[in-house]
Amino acid sequence: MTPGSRRLSSAAAGLALLGLASCSPPVETRGNIPDAVVIGEIKPGVHTKDQVSQLLGTPSSVATFDKNTWYYLGRKTESVAFFKPETIEAQTVVIRFDDKGVVSEIRRLDRESGREIDVVERETPTRGKELNFVRAILGSMGFLGRNPLSGEAAYKKEGRD
């Protein structure tokens, strides 16, 4: 092999590796996924709200009816091209405090211990007319919004300005 062909094959191999590395799907982290080691440092009966806040940061959510329950919610997703993102890891850390603000309980819930929640995809109807394809085309040409026979704008006839 000549030195020129070695360089060419090295460059081709480098480009192939670069192309292969760029194909790895991006991983996105949403929320707060505390490290297990840090969670292990928090001891019930010892640590206070301020100390937990310093170790884990502010909670993702606080219980609505019990201000002494903090939730740290986090999720890692991986998405490939235009496909729906796939959840790799989901975790919820629940920390309960007593009335004095001292940790009384720590629970870690992962994806398997939780339950899937079906999202309701109902839509609130809005007032007005839905545009179909033909109305959208005619509206973009300026034919909608006025009476073509009288030249009067339809919204003025209805009392709107």
Image: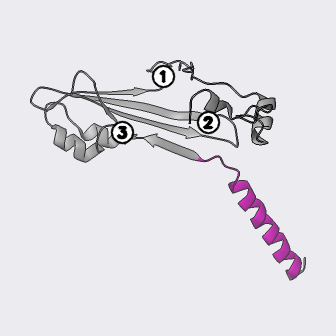
Q: Is tag 2's residue or tag 1's residue first in the polypeptide sequence?
A: 2
In the rendered structure, find residue 112 and report the number of the disc placed on it: 1
Residue furthest front as drawn: 150
CA gap, disc 1 and disc 3: 17 Å
Q: Is residue 79 above or below residue 115?
A: below
Residue 66 is drawn in which quadrant?
top left
Identify the residue at horizontal 82%, vertical 67% (top origin).
12
Q: Nearer the viewer, residue 10 or 77?
A: 77
Q: Which mark is residue 8?
A: none
Disc 3 is placed on an element classified as: helix
Asked which secondary structure carries label 2, the reply is loop
Specify the quadrant that holds the C terminus.
Answer: top right
Q: Which residues are magenta?
A: 4-26
Residue 20 highlighted magenta (yes or no): yes
Do the residues bearing badges 2 and 3 touch, measured as CB atoms within 8 Å? no
- Circle 3: is it few (<14), some (14-19), or many (20+) Cα within 10 Å? few
What's the mark number on residue 85?
A: 2
